[in-house]
Amino acid sequence: MPALNVEFSDRELEDLRQIAKERGTSMKALVREAAAADIARHRALQEGAEVFRRFFRAHADEFAAAFPDDEPPTRGEGRAA
């Protein structure tokens, strides 16, 4: 299995030791679980953003009609440069 060396400050390392001890797990397992949780969170956020983008594209005309003041000006409209 591939491995990764990670450097921590003395304070961070001591905090990790304490948390691992409180949870009854190893530091290695604690860090692996934290990384796995962050990866899962990141993937969920990416998937959620894509669902939102698809929904917004599918309903863009409805949003434009409901919130006309929030629509960007079309070419030729708006302030002069």
Image (cartoon, rainbow, N blue to C red):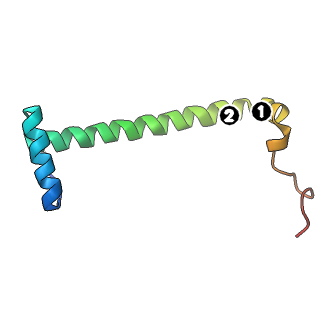
At horizontal 47% and vertical 39% (from top left) the residue drawn is 46
2, above or below 24, in the image: below
Up-down: is 4 above or below 40?
below
**Residue 5 visible in the picture:** no
Q: For residue 56, which numbered disc appears in the image?
A: 2
List the single residue furthest toward the bottom: 81
| Image quarter (top left, top right, bottom left or bottom right) of the N terminus | top left
Residue type marked 1: Phe
Q: Which residue is mark 1?
A: 63
In depth, the one of 75 and 25 nearer the eye is: 25
Location of the C terminus by quadrant is bottom right
Q: Secondary structure at mark 1?
A: helix
Residue 31 falls in which quadrant of the image? top left
Alpha-carbon neighbours of circle 2 within 10 Å: few (<14), some, or many (≥20)? few
Q: Quadrant of residue 67?
A: top right
Q: Is residue 43 left or right of residue 11?
A: right
Query: Are dots 2 and 1 in contact, CB under 8 Å?
Result: yes
* Residue found at x 16% / y 40%: 30
Please state the horizontal and vertical placement of residue 68, each as a whole percent of the image.
85, 38
Residue shown at 68% from the left, 34% from the top: 56
Residue 19 % position (x, y): 14, 41
Nearer to us in this view, 28 or 2: 28
**Residue lying at 87% horizontally and 52% vertically, measured from the top left:** 74
The picture places residue 41, in percent across and down from the top left corner, at: 38, 37
Q: Report if residue 72 is visible in the image.
A: yes
